[in-house]
Amino acid sequence: MTTHAGIVGFRGYSGIELQRILSAHPRTSPWLLEHRADSSAVPQPIGHAGPPRIPCTPQAVAEAGITVVFLATPPEVSMELAPPLLEGGVRVVDLSGAFRLRTAETYRRWYKEEHTQPELLARAVYGLPEINREAIRAARLLSNPGCYPTAASLVIRPLVQAGVIRRSAGVVCDAKSGVSGAGRKPSLKTSFCEVAENFSAYSILDHRHVPEVLLNTGLDESEFTFTAHLLPIDRGILETIYFRAEGLAGAADLLDVYLKAYAAEPFVRLYPAGAVPGLHAVARTNFCDIGVRLDPKSGRAVVVACIDNLVKGAAGQAVQNMNLMLGFDETEGLL
């Protein structure tokens, strides 16, 4: 049977990507859920034929037989919409940061806003399949990870668990993203004249994705330095992660840490020791590609990870989570 999947925020970059993936998925049919009061003023192409469009109300969702709803919306909208949808018996996959953190106090510190649904923080399951697969299967409210934390967590967590980081020396994550990571809403900083032929750092020392990485890896805030940069490209994330290694004789040993962690993972691809990925390798895919370098004399280690911020960093990972939640093969619609 075909599963009806609703998308709220379908006009944004992640929402558009969800439409693309779900339309090609062998087990799903996408429905567009309209939550904006001014939706009638949004022009549609002449002769437009696409997924069905209905209001985002519990009644309309129930009548359409929708099983799962994706919220590709700002955090405040996700907080507003999630409770009635959950009460209506629908599973919710939220792509915003609304439910990624564990306490309202932590959310207030990093997002600079009050959390309006703090009781849902304890119910939300963090949706990074490579570290939380079994909990995801039973989730009713799934919090899709941030794009930067997806790559950073996949790199750093196995290193911490293997005890190969000299933690007193700290871990540095130098992260770069395409402009679509900022969303589709127009702003001066993402306008063509500001971005083209330019390269800039932002949210230095207070990026809202930092606490996600700390939760996933077990690092303390004092041990982790993260800086995000805006690339003059439309999509893709490349993260270069630096640390001092302990107990590793060479790059082959460092690679072996990842082989033990991810040998059976369908969406993590490891490069031979000494080779590193580039953004073209992951564009429009749900893969996270990882490559390692290590200087055994000094212990200096560098790991490079690449993802597509709109796929593994957003819509693709959301569908990967949906597959787990609904009992489908994890890779359906993504390979």
Image: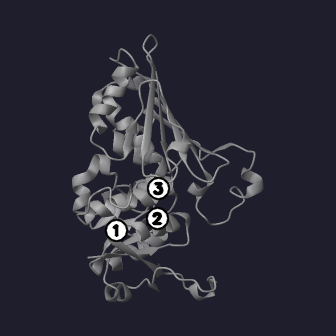
User: Which quadrant would the N terminus be assigned to in this image?
Assistant: bottom left
Question: Residue 4: x percent and y percent?
Answer: 34, 77
Secondary element at image label 2: loop
Q: Is residue 65 left or right of residue 229?
A: left
Label 1: which secondary element: loop
In the image shown, does 95 or 238 lie closer to the viewer? 238
Check disc 2 and report the residue beneath it. Answer: 114
Q: Where is residue 153 drawn, in percent x and y?
A: 39, 42
Q: Amino acid at mark 2?
A: Glu
Residue 216 against residue 97 in the figure, above or below: above
Query: In the image shown, does 92 or 65 lie closer to the viewer?
Result: 65
Q: Nearer the viewer, residue 179 or 203?
A: 179
Residue assigned mark 1:
26
- Depicted 162 relative to depicted 147: above or below: above
Picture colour scheme = one colour
Disc 1 residue type (three-letter): Pro
**Which mark sits nearer the N-terminus, 3 or 2?**
2
Q: Which residue is mark 3?
A: 311
Which numbered disc, 3 or 1, marks the residue that appears first in the sequence?
A: 1
Q: CA distance from mark 3 to mark 1?
A: 18 Å
